[in-house]
């Protein structure tokens, strides 16, 4: 019986190539691989033609899905090559690391002494390198022929660990590896291949310590019931930048090193040229030729066996990108890291919610893609409507496969939705966690929304849940949520809470039918809420300080927009309330100015009355701060009013001219905030009109200069046709 230890680096193409050759020569009758033993039940799925790396083993605690872990594999991962060799050869293959059941049963982490924290750095320094990654690439990853590296790696690691004794989680892992190895020896296997991280090789070399030694280390470890499956993975998730502890800097480059049959540098820089050309950048074959020459020259000058990532990157920057680091970042994202998404067979065991999502995605032809893409949905089409409902249900579960665009709120009244889709493999854990709420996406989302309706949720939270449930078409949750909104609105004496909740409820009442959702009862509840707001608004706005007035004004604007979506009777009740408050002296100037403007815009006040109110607010006896607040509220609806109404412009202009210097400095921030919200053409027109106030001739000249009579006449036929004249 012989045991062959193959110390590898996780996700190393040189290690993977050397291991594949060594296993072909050895022809072992069993292969033991560092990984969770719970995955032995699903390991045979790796032989399927539908299994396309990168993929990962996902293990999670059956009673607590937040305790989960991934074991990723790329095509250039040595462990993946070992799995494929064993399955193709028809020999047993087992995982031999500490079971996930023990890892999830305890929060203890592995421990390693400071002296052995970075073995690569020690070996690199001995070889005259100041960069451990470059040393490993030169010695291992860039090897394409020559002697196998495993004997040298074992000797080096043995020397590094001479004075190191594993403790904690690391000791437990190595004890279990030895236990699995002893079991294989007892079963009579003749040629045992063990594939593990290079650091663990010395701990598995003969002679092994007594079995009782390892039994003591493993005795009494808490454990949990664990489920295990395969999930798709991405190159981006293999990158160190993703936070993956065993990640590599350049998954795309390593994939190229492993899969390219020859001419590594030439093929890589040709791929880079394709990336840049896809962005309509002028990269010719001459660029590729010169970049290859530069990369190979740099490698020769540095004594490297092959142009590495640093050489091809420098050649790309200098020749193809013209020194532009922005373009180089594009190459890094698209080629060096890449976003290749793997695939798993259809028969792979899945959590119930994950299986339901996979079935719905196939039915709706909604493809999972790691790269972000924008999708527009037409809600008049049944398939697009179903996609929208599915994406909204997933968002309720905290699974953001799709994210609505920023302007989606403004488009809720249309039949169009725009989503940005991008699948993150980490969402697989969220799908498992969603199983605590149900066995389907619909059932789990409904349960989550119903929980919001309990007594601990606020009116705003329940109203938001109601709106989200309408978007997701959760018909079983809607009655309970609607009742929750009505009950809380009746009990809540805080008018501010009612006002904050109204916009979402009004949107739901108006736009639910666009999606085919039932909105029965929403308008009635919203109308009752408006009545309660109207009854208590006078108390709410009375005697507010400027900061509080600003907050209440935002609520008033929200209700103003909301009532435009409700029945005319509800709108009339709201506007009548605002009209009665707009002339009260107890209302803060900011709010009074805004209410007056709303009354003008809705034709509930004549222009002459508005001018009279503005004149009073800007009279010399009014404190400058109060007058400035009134102007800010009045002009919050836009500055075109001052362009078209010369009386109001003259009132504001006269007030500004009469402000004493010291008071003007006090009012300046408010004025800047007011006029700063106007568009540039509005500000320019206001300035032109203000200059013409005291000089009628200037106004005539300005009008003559601005008006092109011939050009204006050319549009009259079109205007007449639009008006039906």
Image (tube, rainbow, N blue to C red):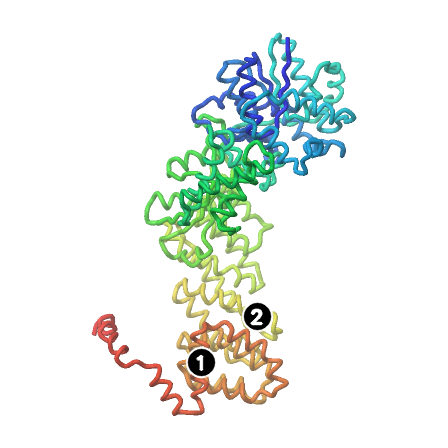
Q: In the image shown, does 623 or 505 lie closer to the viewer?
A: 623
Q: Are marks 2 and 1 in contact (CB under 8 Å)?
A: no
Question: Pointer 2: what residue?
Answer: 550
Give residue 539's quadrant in the image: bottom right
Foreground pick, 347 / 15: 15
* Image position of 350 with respect to 24: above or below: below
Label 2: state its secondary structure.
helix
Q: Which residue is mark 1?
A: 686
Q: Is residue 364 left or right of residue 502?
A: left
Return the x and y of residue 183 as percentages of the image width and height.
65, 13
In the rendering, at what x and y percent does residue 709 appear?
A: 27, 81
Q: Name the foreground residue: 129 vs 45.
A: 129
Quadrant housing residue 360: top left
Q: Is residue 224 left or right of residue 84?
A: right
* Alpha carbon separation for disc pair 2 and 1: 25 Å
* Secondary structure of residue under mark 1: helix
Q: Quadrant of the C terminus?
A: bottom left
* Numbered disc total: 2
Q: Position of residue 456 (x, y in %)?
A: 60, 50
Q: Residues within 10 Å of mark 1 (few under 14, many from 20)?
A: many
**Which residue is at 35% across, 49% downward?**
378
Q: Is residue 393 visible?
A: no
Q: Is residue 26 above or below residue 725?
A: above
**What residue is rendered at 27% in x and 77% in y?**
711
Foreground residue among 428 and 130 = 130
Percent across and percent down for residue 406 are 47, 55
């Amino acid at each position: 019986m012989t045991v062959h230890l193959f110390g590898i680096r996780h996700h190393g193409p040189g290690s993977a190539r050397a291991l594949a050759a060594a296993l072909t020569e050895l022809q072992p009758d069993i292969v033991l691989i560092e990984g969770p033993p719970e995955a032995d039940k699903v390991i045979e799925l790796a032989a399927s033609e539908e299994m396309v790396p990168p993929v990962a083993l996902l293990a999670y605690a059956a009673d607590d899905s937040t305790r989960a872990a991934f074991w990723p594999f790329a095509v250039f991962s040595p462990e993946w090559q070992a799995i494929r060799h064993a399955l193709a050869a028809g020999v047993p293959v087992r995982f031999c690391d500490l079971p996930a059941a023990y890892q999830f049963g305890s929060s203890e982490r592995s421990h390693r002494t400071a002296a052995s924290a970075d073995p690569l750095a020690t070996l690199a320094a001995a070889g005259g390198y100041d960069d451990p990654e470059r040393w490993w690439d030169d010695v291992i990853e860039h090897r394409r022929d020559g002697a196998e590296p495993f004997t040298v790696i074992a000797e080096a690691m043995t020397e590094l660990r001479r004075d190191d004794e594993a403790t904690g989680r690391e000791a437990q892992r190595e004890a279990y590896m030895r236990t699995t190895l002893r079991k294989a020896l007892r079963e009579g296997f003749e040629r045992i291949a063990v594939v593990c991280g290079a650091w663990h090789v010395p701990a598995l070399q003969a002679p092994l310590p007594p079995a009782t030694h390892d039994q003591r280390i493993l005795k009494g470890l808490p454990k949990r019931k664990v489920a295990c499956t395969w999930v798709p993975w991405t190159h981006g998730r293999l990158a160190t930048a993703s936070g993956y502890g065993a990640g590599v800097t350049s998954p795309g480059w390593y994939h190229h090193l492993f899969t390219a049959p020859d001419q590594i540098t030439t093929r890589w820089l040709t791929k880079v040229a394709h990336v840049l050309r896809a962005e309509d950048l002028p990269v010719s074959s001459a660029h590729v030729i010169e970049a290859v020459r530069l990369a190979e020259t740099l490698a020769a000058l540095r004594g490297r066996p092959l142009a590495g990532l640093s050489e091809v990157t420098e050649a790309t920057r200098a020749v193809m990108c013209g020194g532009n680091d922005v373009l180089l970042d594009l190459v890094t994202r698209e080629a060096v890291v890449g976003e290749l998404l793997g695939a798993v067979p259809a028969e792979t065991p899945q959590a119930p919610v994950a299986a339901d999502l996979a079935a719905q995605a196939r039915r709706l032809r909604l493809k999972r893609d790691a790269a972000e893409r924008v999708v527009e949905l037409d809600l008049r089409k049944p398939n697009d409507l179903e996609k929208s409902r599915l994406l909204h249900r997933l968002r309720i579960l905290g699974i953001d496969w799709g994210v609505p665009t920023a302007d989606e709120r403004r488009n809720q009244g249309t039949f169009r939705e725009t989503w940005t889709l991008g699948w993150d493999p980490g969402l697989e854990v969220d799908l498992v966690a969603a199983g605590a709420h149900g066995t389907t996406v619909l059932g789990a989302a409904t349960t989550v929304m119903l929980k919001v309706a309990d007594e601990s949720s606020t009116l705003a939270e329940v109203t938001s849940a109601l709106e989200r449930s309408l978007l997701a078409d959760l018909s079983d949750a809607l009655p309970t949520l609607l009742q929750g909104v009505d009950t809380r609105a009746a009990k809540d004496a805080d008018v501010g809470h009612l006002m904050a909740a109204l916009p979402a409820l009004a949107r739901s009442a108006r736009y639910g039918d666009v999606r085919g959702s039932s909105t029965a009862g929403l308008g009635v509840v919203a109308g009752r809420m408006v009545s309660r707001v109207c009854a208590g608004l006078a108390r709410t706005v009375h005697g507010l300080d400027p900061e509080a007035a600003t907050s209440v004004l935002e609520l008033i604007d929200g209700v103003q927009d909301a009532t435009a979506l409700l029945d005319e009777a509800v709108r009339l009740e709201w506007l009548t309330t605002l009209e009665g408050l707009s002339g009260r002296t107890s209302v803060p100037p900011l709010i009074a100015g805004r209410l007056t403007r709303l009354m003008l815009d809705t034709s509930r006040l004549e222009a002459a009355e508005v001018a009279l109110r503005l004149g009073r607010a800007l009279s010399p006896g009014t404190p400058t701060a109060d007058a400035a607040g009134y102007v800010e509220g009045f002009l919050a609806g836009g500055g075109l009013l001052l362009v078209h109404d010369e009386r109001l412009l003259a009132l504001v202009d006269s007030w500004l001219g009469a402000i004493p210097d010291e008071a003007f400095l006090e009012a300046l921030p408010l004025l800047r905030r007011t006029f700063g919200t106007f568009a540039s053409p509005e500000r320019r027109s206001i300035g032109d009109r203000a200059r013409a106030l005291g000089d009628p001739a200037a106004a005539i000249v300005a009008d003559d200069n601005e008006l092109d009579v011939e050009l204006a006449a050319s549009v009259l036929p079109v205007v007449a046709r639009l008006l039906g004249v």
